[in-house]
Amino acid sequence: METVILAVVIAVVVLAALGGLLVGTRRKKPLPPPPPKAPDITAPPAEPHIGEEAETPREEPRRTIEEVDLPGGPAPVAVEEPPAAVEAPEIEIPEPTAGRLVRLRARLSRSQNALGKGLLTLLSREHLDDETWEEIEDTLLTADVGVQPTQELVESLRERVKVLGTRTPQELRGLLREELLKVVGTDFDRTVKTEPEDRKPGIVMVVGVNGTGKTTTTGKLARVLVADGRTVVLGAADTFRAAAADQLQTWGERVGAYTVRGPEAGDPASVAFDAVKEGKEMGVDVVLIDTAGRLHTKTGLMDELGKVKRVVEKHAPLDEVLLVLDATTGQNGLVQARVFAEVVDITGIVLTKLDGTAKGGIVVAVQRELGVPVKLVGLGEGADDLAPFEPEAFVDALIGD
């Protein structure tokens, strides 16, 4: 028994001694060397000692002080350049209006020659029977001359051809020219009234339905007036179409005309009133007022157009109320003309898109309908394609050379 206990004690002592040796061995294991110390890159380079020659400086591009980051200093502040001044639009000098329709005659005749040539071909037939005269009548009606003027023209032509007897092409052309001039009318006063004798400015209101080119026509009319030496203020009283005021102002800036405008969907009568007031204060020659394109079926809108007219006339009477009609609409244009004439006293007609239709007879029909003259015609998309209407040049374009 004692022998067993002694053996156990010896075993414990031996195990303890072995454990101590292992622990000591682990503690005495050398540690790995520390990593090398990184050089101080912020330290300044060593100064050369006395007697040492300095290194020859290297050629390096010089930097401005704004490009150098000073240690510890504030970041350089970028200096903002002032915004470039907005240049005023260049003022254009419009083409003179004298004889403008004559210069545009070729453009007009391209679309209108069908009428003149058709009539001359029919009149040149050897035998002018009733069927031929019916064809002549149909040609005139197709060109939108209107029923009453067509009957008058055909009757007069029949009488004169019967008296003339023999008919050379030159005689027929002269005969047709005279009769067309009669129905177009040479005794109308076609000047646009912009210079009242007793006051300034002249006041012109432009009316018409949507899509006839009314705002564009107002801008082109400003060019016509400037070309004739007048000063102009534009009133953007079409407040219901968002782009109308911007469009009109652009037209005005091109010729140096000032534009009076109001808030979108504002009161058109208020804008028109302010435009005339501004025109008086500035001492300009003419105020042009562009009104909203009224649908002639909307009674309320037509009443509002009458209100614009009444408010403007608190300053002075209107000198012109110009109705803009699209020549391509034909008889529909006459319906529009009647309704507008009931609301405001139309004093003149502007026919746009006359170069795009062979129905130049609308000139005759609308004058007969309203009893007022066509004063201006639009012959294209160009800025100077609005021309004073000249009956002789128009008829010459109808019948060609």
Image (cartoon, grey):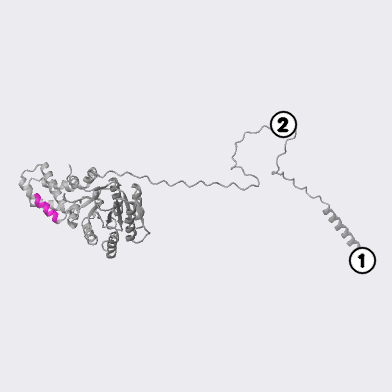
- Tell me the quarter of the picture where residue 67 sits: top right
Q: Nearer the viewer, residue 335 or 235?
A: 235
Query: Residue 230: where, in percent of width, then height?
Result: 29, 48
Q: Circle 2 is placed at which residue position?
A: 53
Q: Quadrant of the C terminus?
A: top left
Query: Residue 326: where, in percent of width, then height?
Result: 25, 54
**In the rendered view, would you say 66 is above or below 195?**
above
Position of residue 27 in the picture relative to residue 145 (left or right): right
From the image, state whether disc 1 or disc 2 is nearer to you: 2
Q: Circle 1 is placed at which residue position?
A: 5
Secondary structure of the residue carrying tag 2 is loop
Q: CA distance from mark 1 to mark 2?
A: 88 Å
Look at the image and give the residue range highlighted in magenta. Answer: 148-157
* Residue type, mark 2 in image: Glu
* Residue type, mark 1 in image: Ile
For this orientation, the residue located farthest to the bottom is 1
- Tell me the quarter of the picture where residue 346 sits: bottom left
**Mark 2 crowd level (few <14, some 14–19, many ≥20, 10 Å Cα):** few
For this orientation, the residue located farthest to the right is 2
Query: Residue 6: where, in percent of width, then height?
Result: 93, 64
Q: Nearer the viewer, residue 375 or 241?
A: 375
Query: Residue 138: where, in percent of width, then height?
Result: 14, 53
Marks 2 and 1: in contact by CB < 8 Å? no
**In the rendered view, would you say 61 is above or below 240?**
above
Q: Nearer the viewer, residue 286 or 162?
A: 286
